Structures are given as structure tokens and as C-alpha cells.
Image (cartoon, grey):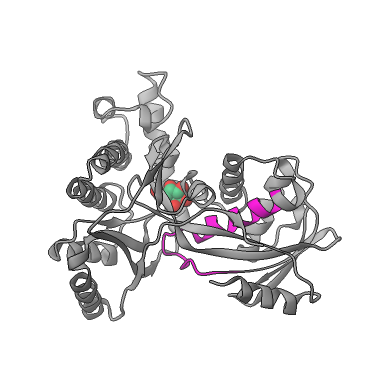
Amino acid sequence: MEIEFVRERFIKHFDGTTGSVYASPGRINLIGEHTDYNGGFVFPGAVDKGIIAEIKPNGKDKVCAYSIDLKDYVEFGLKEEDAPKASWARYIFGVCREMIKRGVDVKGFNTAFAGDVPLGAGMSSSAALESTYAYALNDLFGENRIDKFELAKVGQATEHNYCGVNCGIMDQFASVFGKAGNLIRLDCRSLEYQYFPFKPEGYRLVLLDSVVKHELASSAYNKRRKSCENVVAAIKKNHPNVEFLRDCTMDMLNAVKNEVSEEDFKRAEYVIEEIQRVMDVCDALEKNDYETVGQKMYETHYGMSKLYEVSCEELDFLNDIAFDCGVTGSRVMGGGFGGCTINLVKTELYETFITTATQRFKEKFGRTPKIYDVVISDGSRKLC
Ligand code: GLA
């Protein structure tokens, strides 16, 4: 997406002047799903699709915001009671409020924004939006006093406090900290992170978007998180130092089998295994062992489908096709309940895989999946 596209609309929509332009990306995640809020590891990277926003302080005490893609215009004040109804505007409002809570003297501004992260595809379009505004407000009103981690937390708190999703830190972290050509392993408990150059020779990473959006995704997501907390509470009785599922072993989980629901047990089993898989994948990557990376991705898919139950028929189908086509690794990516599969495929198999997947998906579901080639890119930044 181009700056000019946003700028032209900003000029047209407001008083003809220009402001500053900021951008933040969506993300992929190679492995480590639903591990962030369990204190575990994640392995995301920013992508070349994101949000671009032009912003200019307007000398008033209200925000005048225009969504170019939705052709929707909303005005809101900066006090807690001024929350707008439109869900897209709540993200911007939430970021303003969270910055104010952190001592930034946010004033009114005019803004127009547009994005090319597909909505509901599991690529974190909402985190891209939050990071864009957190980064911009810090620059415009906060003298860049808020550090990058806190900016990611501003986005996360926006989800919690203004959008009803009790998400972890992965999406906002990846959006703010992204670095071209690198995946980032983040320890979500200590917040230590490490960049891993990711240029798998002879392979390509591609997303297949099922174009399924789950209506109740946010309540189902919050329910998964609750299950994990239930299990931690049960294990804590015998092991008071346990804080997250990250601290638990399968033996500890088995010991409380009769105290937790069957469902909660399955959820925790998935998470404990998934945290280990991230470590295994990092080891394998250091040895350029993409076969192991791929195998772990299939294991994650199985866990997300059968234990965590966040897949759906369309995603399982795409995963099966990948397997049939000899794709090295494939799994549902992101929170689940629809969205994309992420696929690690040998370059020579790429064309056959895409053609076969497109055809077979169309035969079964009457529409074609969308295909996105992944380019790992930079995080939040000021463009001009
Ligand atoms: C969503 C959340 C993240 C993370 C993933 C699953 O994207 O926003 O915090 O929990 O789901 O890994």
C-alpha cells in the first residue's frame, strides 16, 4: 500500500494540509500458538502488509477519524465516557486512553488510515492498527518517552479494556518489534527476545486464507484462556510457585486429571506440548533442519484441531491437502476459528500445491482460498 493513497484522502477529507504518516504491520507466527498468555514462547515475524495512517493535531479536544477502507467517519472526545460505537474507532480511542493512562498528554487530531492486512485472516489487522496509533501518539504527544514494549502493551490493553478480547502480547509485540528478514522468539514471561534470520533456502512460506470468520471468535478465545487459568489454579494447590502453564509439566497436569474438566485438561495438554514445540523448532532452525520444523507445524495443527479445538472444517481440509501434496509443514495460524493456514513448502512443489489446494477447496466449498506469499518485514515506523 502506498503513502500517496492515504495522503490524498487525508488532504481531501480534512483541511487540505498534511500531517505525519506512520505504519505498522500485521504478523505471521511460525509456531507457538495460544502460548503467549500462558507465559510461554512465540515465534512471530512482521509482514509486508499493514496499516498506514496520516495524523495531524487539530488544536481541539476531539479526534476526527476517517477509515478510508470503510468510508466511515467518526468523531470522539478523549475522556473515558467518549467511547465511540464503531468497532474500528474503538481501537483508536482505546489507544488514546491507554496512552493518557501512561502520562502522555494526548490532544485532539485529524486522522485517515487504510490497510491491506486481510481482516479476520489471523494476521492481526487490529494489532497493526493499535501499534500504528500507539507509535504515532508517542511521537506526536509523548516525545517518544514510552518504550517499545510499553507501546505493545498499550495495544494489548486496548484489546482487553475496550474491545473485549483478553489476548496475549504476541501480535502487538510482533507489529512493533518486526525486523525485515527475521523472525523473533519471544519469551512471554520474561519478555526476553531474540531475532532469528529466516531465509529458508529452497523453501517458501505461504498463507492460504480459508476466508472463514468465526462470529464468536472473541468469546471462544476468552474461554480458552479461562480453561488454562482453571488448570493453573488446580496445579497451584500442590505447586504454589506455578504461575502459568509454562511452569507445568505433563506429570503435573496428569496429577490433577480428576480435579479439572475433561475439556480444560485437553486445552492444557495442547499448551504444554506447544511450548515445547517452539523450543524444538528453534533448535531445528539452528541446524537448518526444515523437515523437523515442518513436522512440528503438523503436530501443532493436530493439537489446535483436536485438543484446543480452534480449527474448522475448511482449515482442516487445507491442512490435509498440504499433507497430500508433500508440503513440509502446515498448520492453522493465529487465534484460529477461521483465517489462514501457514505452509512451509519446497520451492519445486509450490505451484502444484497452490493449484491443487485452490481446485480442491473450490470443489468442496464453492469458493477459492486467498493466497498470500509471506515477506518478513519491519515493524512500526514513521514514514514521513
Ligand atoms: C491471537 C491473540 C494472540 C495469541 C494468538 C494465538 O492472535 O491476539 O495474543 O494468543 O491469538 O497464538
Quadrant location of the C terminus?
Answer: bottom right
**Residue 323 within the segment the image draws in magenta:** no
Q: Is residue 260 visible?
A: yes
Q: Position of residue 305 (x, y in %)?
A: 26, 53
Magenta residues?
Answer: 114-138
Image x and y of residue 349, in percent: 18, 67
Question: In the rendered view, would you say 165 is above or below 63?
Answer: above
Viewer-closest of 343 and 289 = 289
Asked whether, in this view, residue 264 is left or right of residue 115, the answer is: left
In the image, taking residue 327 as reference, residue 224 lies left or right, namely right
Residue 211 location in percent, x, y? 37, 71
Image-quadrant location for residue 113: bottom right
Give the residue displayed 50% in from the left and 54% down from the top: 378
Q: Is residue 217 left or right of residue 360?
A: right
Viewer can see residue 166: no
Q: Residue at x 22, y 66 (%)?
A: 317
Total numbered labels = 0
Residue 122 vs residue 243, the one in the foreground: 122
At 48% from the left and 66% from the top, the residue drawn is: 117
280 versus 206 height, above or below: above
Instruction: Point out the residue furthest to the right here.
Output: 59
Where residue 355 appears, x then y in whole percent? 22, 76
Q: Would you place residue 86 above or below residue 201 in this image?
A: below
Give me the residue at 26% from left, 37% from top: 283
363 w.r.t. 142: above or below: below
User: In which quadrant of the rendered view does residue 373 lie?
Assistant: bottom left
